[in-house]
Amino acid sequence: MGLKEEFEEYAEKAKSLPPTTTDADKLILYGLYKQATVGPVNTSRPGMFNPRDRAKWDAWKAVEGKSKDEAMSDYITKVKQLQEEAAAAA
């Protein structure tokens, strides 16, 4: 299985992470996903009256230097880690 296929598989698995997944972890996944699928940030930062979108933009900006392959690989690793944590807590 290629990296792209594995990434898509884990993107699906990420949808079923437990509700206990922290917002910080969700933002990390969001940033890596956007970097892997879109590339570097291509929008301006949302204003302070939109804290949710601003946090998502910041998470994406934080991983801007990664290649798409690096972002995919890191995303897969993070989803695996969150699945293991959820299994251990269950």
Image (cartoon, grey):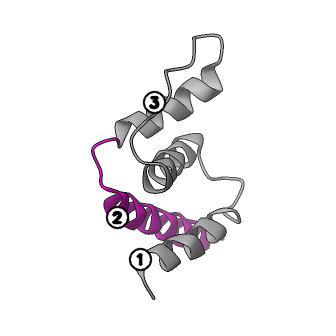
- Is residue 88 visible in the rendered structure shown here? no
Tell me the kind of residue under disc 3.
Asp
Where does the C terminus fall, quadrant-wise? bottom right
Q: Position of residue 88 (x, y in %)?
A: 56, 72
Q: Give the residue number, with chain letter if any, for mark 3.
A: 58
- Tell me how far mark 2 sits from mark 3, CA to CA: 20 Å
Cα gap from disc 1 to disc 3, whole angstroms: 25 Å
- Residue drawn at 44 percent across, 56 percent down: 36
* Region rendered in magenta: 64-90
Location of residue 75 in the rendering, given as x and y in whole percent from the top left corner: 45, 61
The residue carrying mark 2 is: 69
Which residue, given by chain and number where applicable, does mark 1 sit on? 3
> In terms of depth relative to the viewer, which is nearer, 70 or 78?
70
Contact between marks 1 and 2 (CB within 8 A): the answer is yes
Callout in the foreground (2, 3): 2
Q: Residues within 10 Å of mark 2 (few under 14, many from 20)?
A: some
Q: Are marks 2 and 3 in contact (CB under 8 Å)?
A: no
The residue shown at (54%, 47%) is 30
Q: Is residue 18 visible?
A: yes
Which of the marked residues, 2 or 3, is nearer the chain's N terminus?
3
Answer above or below: position of 90 versus 74.
below
The residue under label 1 is which amino acid type? Answer: Leu
